[in-house]
Image: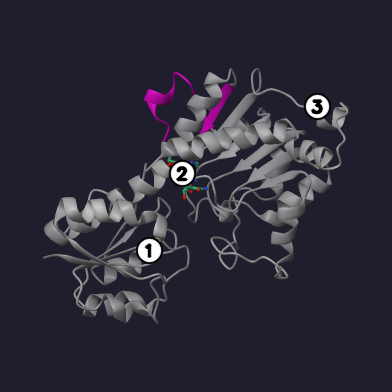
Amino acid sequence: MTKIKVFDARQEEMLAFEEWAEANGVTLSFEEGVLNQASVHLAQGFDGISTKQIAKPEPEVYAILKEYGIRQIAQRTAGFDMFDGPLATENGIIITNTPEYSPASIAEFTVGNCLNVLRRLKNVEEKIEQQDFAHFPDIRGTTIRGKTVAVVGVGSIGSHTARLFHAFGAKVLGYDVTPRDDYRSFVDYQDCLEDALKNADIVTVHTPLDATTHHMFDYETFKQMKPGAVFLNNARGGVMNAKDLFKVLDEDHLFGAAIDVYEFEEPYVFSKHTHEVIEDKDFLRLIQDPKIIYTPHTAYYTDEAIHNMVTIAMDAALEVIQTGDAKHRTN
Ligand code: NAD
């Protein structure tokens, strides 16, 4: 019987794992910890592995997996920037991800948090806390209807987000290195990022994190945005320079932001840090800034997403084990 070692296994995934294992006749073995140099020995004797981590495995891990005869790593998220693709390829290891496990989860969250910024939810909550129910302009909001939204990266999640903003009555501009004709009915593609930014009241980024998008949103890019615009990042922390975001907010160039991902979130996000001092001053600012609605990488987090991530990742693991290739390979 095929045996797969599952790293970073969460309690909430167990029902989906059990159903999948039974349906496919595969034995699964679970570890709470992530895949790294200290834990890789646990994969020995297994046919394949899956993980769900944001931490990068050390470079040595790939060669050790090869030595164990393991030919794949099935990551149970869409993002796969934690892996070294070329090094994995060098060692004959296929990295698979779970694209499109629930684009609706991230798209709905993006639009919801956009509304929270536009309707000044942080101010409203603060007033309620003080039992101040008076109506003053500091809690008066604006609508999405009638606004122009720029979607940067019109892929699986970006296109879903674009459809939702379009349905709200916004004009949707798009910027993507590969525009798609089937999205043109609801996205007006712009030739360059600057054209999309300068005309938009709301900018939402949905590109992957790679060399072309790292710090794509820096001081210069933020300044290209319309004064008073809203910035939404539900993609990856590294696509923006957080210090530059703070700078443009301090200059009152932007109205506000909703940020779900932070470049250096790894020591904090997905674990509890109550009563601890947060050493990273930029992270602290992200959490506390009254103009920012910060959420700890929450956009994907729904019942539907958890179920689909497990099923898609495990199907991909089995596909590589059985055929030597996979439709969701990333390298
Ligand atoms: P996707 O590959 O379907 O779409 C990405 C799009 O970005 C593609 O259309 C691509 O052509 C475009 N693109 C790539 N480089 C570009 C560039 N330099 N300039 C402009 N466009 C560019 O990916 P997806 O599944 O829609 O995921 C989008 C992002 O969302 C990823 O960064 C992913 O890691 C992130 N994500 C976040 C969460 C969360 O919980 N916050 C959950 C899932 C995915």
Neighbor class of circle 3 (other Cα within 10 Å; few <14, some 14-19, many 20+) is few
| Quadrant of the snapshot with the C terminus | bottom left
Is 46 contained in the magenta span?
A: no
Q: CA distance from mark 2 to mark 1?
A: 17 Å
Q: Earlier in the sequence, mark 2 or mark 1?
A: 1
Give coordinates of residue 165: x percent, y percent: 55, 25
Q: Earlier in the sequence, mark 2 or mark 3?
A: 3
- Residue at point 32%, 52% (across, down): 15
Q: CA distance from mark 1 to mark 3?
A: 44 Å
In the image, residue 47 sits, relative to residue 42, either above or below, namely above
Kind of residue at badge 2 = Thr
Is 180 contained in the magenta span?
A: yes
In the image, residue 164 sits, relative to residue 222, either above or below, namely above
**For numbered disc 1, what is the local secondary structure?**
loop
Magenta region: which residues?
A: 171-187
Q: Is residue 76 visible?
A: no
Neighbor class of circle 2 (other Cα within 10 Å; few <14, some 14-19, many 20+) is few
Answer with left or right where residue 253 lies relative to residue 162. right
Which dot marks residue 140? 3
In the image, residue 144 sits, relative to residue 9, either above or below, namely above
Give coordinates of residue 13: x percent, y percent: 37, 55
Tag 2 residue: 302
Tag 1 residue: 9
Neighbor class of circle 1 (other Cα within 10 Å; few <14, some 14-19, many 20+) is many
